[in-house]
Image: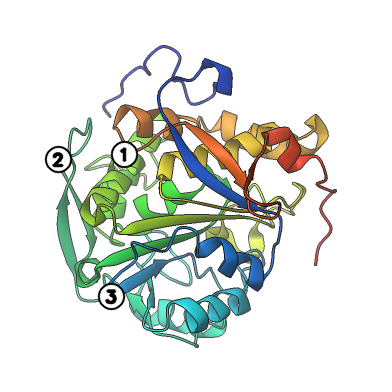
Amino acid sequence: MTTTKPVPGTGGDHYIPYSERSGAESVVYFTRDLSAEGLLKIFKRISANLTGKTAIKLHTGEPHGPNIIPRPWVKNLIEKALPEAAIVETNAYYAGGRDTTEKHRATIALNGWNFCPVDIMDENGTAVLPVKNGKWFTEMHVGKNLLNYDSLFVLTHFKGHVQGGFGGSDKNIGIGCADGRIGKAMIHTTPGSTNQWDIAKEEFMERMTESSKAVVDHFGKNIAFVNVMRNMSVSCDCEGTAAEPVVTPNVGILASLDILAIDQASVDLIYAMKETDRKALVTRMETRHGLRQLTYMKELGMGNDKYKLIDIDNGDKEITLEEAVKDVVPFKSE
């Protein structure tokens, strides 16, 4: 297995405070309104370039997954803003309810994603996208049907992840657009290894992010991102009903045209919480070295780690992270 040492200061267990970052600022919109109306309202702030045939990349979940984005929210958004759009997914790499197209379609139906087309993009094979300036890859295999779309709306349930530390927009497309056999194996497993999960920490974050970059570069300006900070278990939605109980408070919804800025802002909002509220998710991110996703996106030129946080609930006022989380309350299961 090939390994490399992280660049000093970019180790994935090291959080970089805002004051220590450099470069330009992007815009990240924020609402506390965790509802179908809140999602629709914030989506409209970043939807202008979603033209032509639009794909919505979200995690439809394992059977009976408890923490996925509520289906009524997505149904409302599609009906009112993206009536011709399709939800897109790829088959899973791990064994479970989504590792074959047949099982995946059954799980999609079971979880209630039956109000619009759902395209399992690797059902009929793969396509190859170039990876520019990658350390690990020159190309990435994605679901073949990804190339059928003109625009991509990345709708992400922000949460923890057992391998990635956290799952934001980067993971949603870096893993979620890679096909279930070739692309996902390239990210997770050293060629020839019998261990499906032998790549971890900095190397895993870098491989996943290079896959994400291939998708971002492919769509260019025709891509937009929303992170829903609700029901944030330390476990990913891929763990389904086995996910760890949620203990992190709900925050709100973020939207941006910058994939790095939105994931960075989501992480920053967790760190801005009180110690007792942030501890579980911060521990998950740091022990898995998940923060390397952020520094590597910056190294690859995928966006900015500085941003203006714009509160759309209060006249588009720019607010601090502390203002955004000052009224969060301990999580209570819905």
Residue occupied by mark 1? 207
Label 3 residue SS: loop
Q: Quadrant of the N terminus?
A: top left
Q: Is residue 71 above or below residue 257?
A: below
Question: How dense is the environment of label 2, judged by Cα within 10 Å: few (below 14), some, or many (20 and up)?
Answer: some
Report the side of 247 relative to 9 (left or right): right
Question: How dense is the environment of label 3, judged by Cα within 10 Å: few (below 14), some, or many (20 and up)?
Answer: some
- N-terminal label among 1 and 3: 3
Which residue reaches farthest top?
8
Q: Amino acid at mark 1?
A: Arg
Question: How dense is the environment of label 1, judged by Cα within 10 Å: few (below 14), some, or many (20 and up)?
Answer: many
Label 1 residue SS: helix
Report the side of 90 relative to 143 (left or right): right
- Cα–Cα gap, marks 2 and 1: 11 Å
Residue 201 appears in the rendering: no
Report the side of 46 relative to 214 (left or right): right
Query: Which is nearer the eye, 80 or 299?
Result: 80
Residue 55 appears in the rendering: yes
- N-terminal label among 2 and 1: 2
Q: Is residue 213 above or below residue 46?
A: above
Q: Identify the residue shown where x is 40% and y is 36%.
A: 205
x, y percent for residue 154: 42, 59
Residue occupied by mark 3? 53
Label 2 residue SS: loop
Residue occupied by mark 2? 138
